Image: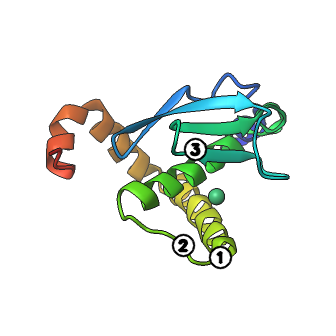
Amino acid sequence: MCEGEKMKETNGKEIPKTLDICGVTFHVEITDKINGDGVACEINYKDNKIYLTKKEAARYSINKVLQTLIHESLHAIDRYAIYFEADDKNTYEFCTKIRSTQLIQLFKHNPQLLRMLNHVCKYKEEYDNVLFRKE
Ligand SMILES: [Zn+2]
């Protein structure tokens, strides 16, 4: 059903410029200045940026970019919403990878959840007051 979409390359066009995570605006920047070796994406809490390598942004399918952005978003949620700090970085990265993949799988296999999410997005103001108490 989604064959065409699966093959679609991003070419950087589909990548959002910003993400609002826990009320913090993160700018998504396509760059070559990522510190870690072989890392495709990185979140920086000092300048509120999510870095994605140029190479990966050009090569990745929408599905992979989505997975990467959700992966980095989960890191920010852990930090800002549950104040979680991992002792074992490798295990934490592995768990984050599993969570992002499974979250996407959940929505892929349950499009009714996406329809509900679209509805909530459409009436954002109304639902924000119910779901999140902004202090
Ligand atoms: Zn990570």
Q: What residue type is labelled 1?
A: Thr
Q: State the quadrant of the N terminus.
A: top right
Asked which quadrant contains residue 127, the reply is top left
Q: Where is residue 63 in the image (x, y as percent from the top left)?
A: 68, 44
What is the distance, in whole Å, between disc 1 and disc 2 at their CAs? 8 Å
Q: Residue most toward the front? A: 46
In the rendered structure, the answer to whether residue 48 lies left or right of residue 114 reads right
Q: Going from the N terminus, do you reach mark 1 or mark 2 first?
A: 2
Camera-nearest label, 1 or 2:
2
Task: Identify which residue, 105 or 68, lies in the foreground.
Answer: 68
Q: Residues within 10 Å of mark 1 (few under 14, many from 20)?
A: few
Q: Do the residues labelled 1 and 2 touch (CB within 8 Å)?
A: yes
Which quarter of the frame holds ligand 1?
A: bottom right
Q: Position of residue 38 (x, y in %)?
A: 85, 52
Please report the residue visible at 32 percent of the width from the left and 36 percent of the height from the top: 121
Question: Mark 3 falls on what kind of element?
Answer: strand
Q: Position of residue 102 (x, y in %)?
A: 57, 64
Q: Is residue 65 above or below residue 90?
A: above
Q: Going from the N terminus, do you reach mark 2 or mark 3 first?
A: 3
Residue 44's disc is 3
In the rendered structure, the answer to whether residue 19 lies left or right of residue 42 reads left
Q: Residues within 10 Å of mark 2 (few under 14, many from 20)?
A: few
Q: Position of residue 5 (x, y in %)?
A: 69, 36
